[in-house]
Image (cartoon, helix red, strand yellow):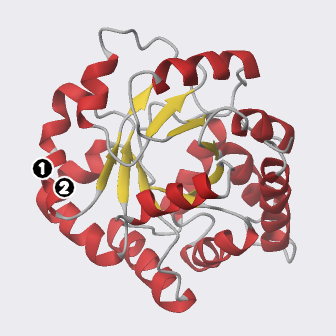
Amino acid sequence: MSRIAARFAKLKAEKRAGLVTYVVAGDPNPDISLEILKGLPKAGADLIEFGMPFTDPMADGPSIQAGGQRALKAGITMDKTFDMVRRFRAETGDQDTPVLLMGYYNMIYQRGAERFCTDAAAAGIDGFIIVDLPPEEADELKPHATKAGLDTVLLAAPTTDAKRLPAILQFASGFVYFVSILGITGTTSASEEAVKGHVARLRAQTALPIVAGFGIKTPDQAAAVARHADGAAVGTAIVDRVKAGLDDNGQPKPDLLPGIFAYIRALADGMRGARQG
């Protein structure tokens, strides 16, 4: 059983949804980013999305774009990103928390899909969420990912109709990422009723877990998603807290790490009580 499947099985047994946290690899610099990565599970993250900084993102809002620029300026590369995950596994001893790379296909294309999957698996990565990889082109990556034991998470949106959804589900593995709003990350939030309806529609078509993301910022919003989906993904609000932890010169302030982890604990606590009663 993969780490992703095992984690969702554990969450199901505990009758709760998982907190999926997104951080940008290398933001604000590789050293601090590694400390953030290492501290996420203890703070309450059930799964981790590790963003691959890219110069030309198409789905990222201003906050995550800025985080990517900070990381690129600090010298992040794919090799360093792989090494950070490798060190996370080695230095924490955590062999259970799933880590997925999230970003754009250009990063995979430049290295070559087969080599990229091999390198990712060797580093301790569990799968990919590739925002601009449509199902029509997923077979460029899927065979190599499957051979390496990696999941390919595809995205569904409120506009994904009944005709297109089967094409997405044909290639999806690990879980389905439901983009709960139209537009870029961190700009608005979906209502609980909207999430409930879309999740029910997806559940009728797949047995895969469903994670809802884009626009979740508060513990109450995370709890609302947790009442219906198998996971709630939070990214922009965490990246905003990285920025808030920097001084005017872009240097980390003493409260950067404590502030991030306190926020994640608040999200996790809110979600844990979402299904009580």
Does 229 sit above or below residue 256?
above
- Asked whether, in this view, residue 10 is left or right of residue 123, the answer is right
Element on which disc 1 rests: helix
**Residue 112 visible in rendering:** no
Determine the CA span between mark 1 and mark 2: 5 Å
Work out whether residue 100 or residue 211 is closer to the camera in this orientation and state it.
Answer: 211
Report which quarter residue 244 is drawn in: bottom right
Kindly indicate whether the residue at mark 2 contacts the one at mark 1 (C-beta within 8 angstroms). Answer: yes
Give residue 11's position: percent from left, percent from top: 60, 56
| Residue drawn at the location 87% of the way across and 40% of the way down | 277
Label of residue 146 in the image: 2
Work out whether residue 158 or residue 75 is closer to the camera in this orientation and state it.
Answer: 158
- Asked whether, in this view, residue 100 is left or right of residue 170, the answer is right
Does 122 sit above or below residue 201?
below
The residue beneath circle 1 is 143
Give residue 209's position: percent from left, percent from top: 48, 41
**Residue 133 visible in rendering:** yes
Residue neighbourhood size for the residue with mark 2, other residues' Cα within 10 Å, grouped as few (<14), some (14–19), many (≥20): some
| Residue drawn at the location 53% of the way across and 91% of the way down | 91
Report which quarter residue 183 is drawn in: top right
Quadrant of the snapshot with the N terminus: bottom left
- Asked whether, in this view, residue 97 is left or right of residue 129, the answer is right
| Residue drawn at the location 61% of the way across and 78% of the way down | 38
